[in-house]
Structures are given as structure tokens and as C-alpha cells.
Amino acid sequence: MSEVSTTPLLSLENVRVEFGGLVALNDVSFSVSRGEIVGLIGPNGAGKTTAFNVACGFVSPTAGNVNFPQAGKQNLRPHQLAQAGVARTLQGVGLFTHCTVLENVMAGGQRRPGGDFLTSLVGLTRGAKSEAQLRTDALEALDRLGVADFAKKLPSEIPYGISKKVSVARALINKPSLIMLDEPASGLDESELDEFAELISEMRKSMGVVLVEHNMEFVMPLVDRLVVLNFGQVIATGTATEIRSNPDVLAAYLGVDE
Amino acid sequence: MIASIFASRILNDLLGGITAGVVIGLVALSLVLIWQSTHVLNFAQGAMAMFATYIGMTQLDHHLNYWVCALISVAAGFVLGGATERVLVRPLYGKADINPIVVMVGFLSLLEAIAAAIWSGTPRFIDPPFSSIFFQSDGAPTGLSPFALFQIIAAISVMAATALLFRFTKLGLQLRASALAPEVARLLGVRVNRLLTLGWALSTAVGAVAAVIISTGDTGLYPANMETVFIAGFIAAAIGGLESPGGALLAGVVIGVVMQFVNDYFNSGYAGFVGVILLIVSLLIRPQGLFTKNAQRRV
């Protein structure tokens, strides 16, 4: 395990989210720092996706705060995340259907300067140059994940496992400091799972990783820390070994009343 | 021999049809741009373009040059389009599909009424910057005038510029991404709301180019002067499938040419039916539009 930086990249602080009368998250706190992989697990409906959505600004907290201490930001809107060094992949893959694989990855590179309206419209050098750079970076990102051969294909023409890699390439093109992966293992076969586990371990060297995952065999050996949610509350945090033997967690997963 | 070909009635009609058709294509393109970015059928598209043209072309009274006035019209279209999205359309996202239709039909009537109140309903004739007398070939007219040639070149240039913008620039990619999957685009750092405003601004600017062309010369500028071409453009966009700028353009040219032939060989009164018949036939053959790749369309 690489060294964990002390200032967290993301920190949820007593976050509460209500939808109408329903409490989706209650007093949820956890943090993610550079160099660690944090897994967010819990039974269906526990609030994992809501926790991701509130972190990304798709949902506003009813109470509490979503902090990005390293970026010095708080409660960001979705479009501000990239600028703050945060990338997120979606459940499924979320590729733009009518755009090629390469264009999809290029669309992820929105932080770079240049390419504003006027330069794009009249094709001035600055815009043109940064676009060439963006293209190169996108191809590199695809190459790093071993899927550069598919650059000119449309998302409908490539296998699911490849699309997942493309969506990760798109998230990585901005060199984020925190990556949020929403169910990275879903829909992948054995060998693809191994590849993804390796890839995520590799990411830890240069950033913080937080992931929501159902597949316990995939997530347990991979993560440094687990945060277990049940009915919108954090019922346990700890290493995989600690969580495995935690009676509250067992009860939540097995549906045993205490 | 060549002279007789050039002067032939068929070639005359073909050229006249193409000239009218490219403008129909421009109107269709502007409708497709808005449909693609915000899934709103903008019934006020023609009226907005007319209004922008009034703002620009009344500057002729201040002895400004035709081209400067044309530029002001397009800029006014850009601003009017952006402002309309921001003020009238944005509150309607996520509501029932009928809401924006009702609002835009209302806006159409409002704009025509305001234009009549400010500038009166009397057509205002604008001198074309190029002659509208047909080129002659051995003393016989060819069906194409210098102004018509300008019209074709201007329309094709605007379409090409739009296509290049969407296809090859980062801005175009952002526009496409915002239209296809706004949530994902937001996560990637795209200011989706701004781009929707920009989509409307660009589209209305394109519409204003069409309105400037139509208002110059015989038709003149008056509050309802875009209605006929708007209906033709609307039909062209529907035939093209609403998702395909190229299809909209091609459909526009086909409608323009067919109308011209019907006008010439039958009765000018029939021309209005032609578009509707073409629309019905195309919807019967391929309801999703002739040029869309996917079979599903959200209407």
C-alpha cells in the first residue's frame, strides 16, 4: 500500500439527504485520501448511489457538508468536479452513443484551457492546437488501457468490457486526483475482473479511489478500507478483515435482527 | 445548342428550385439544431428570425451598409435565441412536451404583433446587394441570378460552417455531448446549461441568415414573411428525421425543387400542398425520418 496523504480529497461530514419524507442518508461521514482505495458497500437500497450522487452534487444535502479539502472546495456542482480534480464513472458505461470512442474520451478533457467559443468557431491557432493535444491525450489514455484499436468505433460496435475501459479512459484523461467508480465490476467476466482489479490498484499510486460495488469477491481483496451502509446510515468502517467479522454487517447482509 | 439547354424550362425550374430550397434547408437546419440540443420543436423559429432581421435591416434607415445590417441581424438572432432559451424555455425542461409547444406558438404571435406595432405590417423592400436579374445565355435567361447565386453560396457556407463546428471542434463535441447525455457531460466538466443557451443562439443566428435572404428582394420584410418558408422548413426537418442536419438540408432542396416545378407546370396554388403530401408520403414510408439511423424517436 502506498503512502496515504493526510488531507483528504473527499470528506462527507454528517450528510443527511431526504427525498420528500424519505430519509435516504442519515448522518453519513467518511473520507477518501490520495493513495487509498475506499469501498462503499451495503445491501440494495442502503444509500450507496445516493452517497455518490450527493458527493457529485447531483443531489444536495439536506444537512451536513460535502468537502473537498485538498481542492479547498465545498458542495460542488457536477460541472465543477472536473476542475476540482474529481472524475466519476457511471453505473453501466454512460458513453455518448453517436460519438466515436475517441470523441467520447476527448469529451472528458474539458479542464484544459483554450477551445472557447470564438477560437473554435474561427479555428484560431490556440483552439486548434489544444484540440490536437486533446486528441493525442485521448489516444494515449485509450492506449494505456489497451483499447486504442477501437478509437474510431461507435460505442454500439464494441463489447461491453471494452466500453467499460473506454469510460475509465475518459475519466482518467484529466489526470484526476480522485476517481469515483460506480460498480466497476458489473457485467464483466472473470478475466476482465482481474484486469480491472489490477487497473484500480494501479490508480491508487497517483490518486484516491472510491468505489461502489456489489461483488464482494472483487471488492474485498482490493480495498484498503470499507464503509458499510445500511438504511442510509454508516454501520461500520474498517479493513476487509474487520468488516468480515463485524456482527452488525453480517446482520445487515443476512437480514438477521439483533 | 448549349444556349437552348441553359434556357430550357427544366433547367430554369431546377435552378430556381434549388435557390428556394437551400433557404428552406437553412430553416430546417435551425429547427434541427434546437431539437437536437433541447428536444423542443420551436414554432417561433421563423418569427424570431424575422424579428432579428427587423432589428438589423431597419438600420438601413441610418445609412448603414447592407452587409453591416445583415451582420447586425444575425447578431440580433444570436442574442434573441440565447435570451429566449434562458428566459422562456429553461423553466419548461422536464415538463410535459406540450408545454414548450404552447409557449413557442404564443411567442410566435407575440413577436409578429410586436413587430407590426413597431415597424408596421407594410412590407419593407430591401435592395439586393447583387442584381436579381437572371444571367443570360445567348440572350435567354438561365434561371439563376447573381443574387440567387449568392443565396446558394451563403446558405451552403452556413451549413458547412455549422457541420464543421459540430464535427471537428471541442465546442461542437461539448454541444453534442450535452444533447446526448447531459448528466454525463456535466460530470465531465461541461457547462451544459450554457451550451443549451448557445445551441439556441446559434440556431436562431442560422435562422436569421435565412430571414435576411428571404427579406431581401421581391418578398420584402413584413411580420409574417417567414411563415411560408417556416412551414416548408418544418416539413423538411420532419422528413429528414429531426436528428439529421444533412437530411434536413437535402429534404429542403427537394421540397424547393418540387414546389418550383409544380408552380411552373400546374398552378402556384398547388405548391402549398406539395410539402404536405411529401411529408405524408415520407411519414408513411419511414416514420422515423428518411435520414435517421435509429428507429426510435422521442416525440
Image (cartoon, coloured by chain):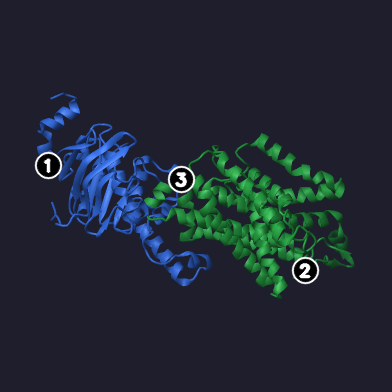
In primary-sequence order, the first of circles 1 and 3 is 3
Label 1 and label 2: CA atoms lie apart by 80 Å
**Which residue is at a point 71% across and 58% down the rendered structure image?**
B117
Q: Chain of mark 1?
A: A
In percent of width and height, residue A37 lies at: 19, 48
Where is mark 1, residue-wise? A239
Residue A192 visible to the viewer: no
Camera-near label (1 vs 2) is 2
Question: Chain B colour?
Answer: green
In the image, is A46 to the left or to the right of B189?
Answer: left
Residue sitting nearer the eye, B275 or B250: B275
Where is mark 3, residue-wise? A97
The local secondary structure at tag 3 comes to: loop
Hey, which quadrant is residue B63 in on the image?
bottom right
Hey, which quadrant is residue A183 in on the image?
top left
The C terminus of chain A sits in image quarter: top left
The local secondary structure at tag 2 comes to: loop
In percent of width and height, residue A19 lies at: 33, 37
Neighbours of disc 1 within 10 Å: few (<14), some (14-19), many (20+):
some
Where is mark 2, residue-wise? B127
Residue sitting nearer the eye, B9 or B21: B21
In percent of width and height, residue B31 lies at: 61, 50
**Which residue is at a point 53% across and 38% down the rendered structure image?**
B96
Q: Furthest residue to the right? A: B139
Answer above or below: position of A42 versus A15: above
Q: Confirm whether circles 3 and 2 share one chain.
A: no
**Which residue is at a point 41% across and 43% down the rendered structure image?**
A158
Camera-near label (1 vs 3) is 1
Q: What kind of residue is marked 1?
A: Thr
Q: Furthest residue to the front? A: B117
Label 3 and label 2: CA atoms lie apart by 47 Å
Q: What kind of residue is marked 2?
A: Asp
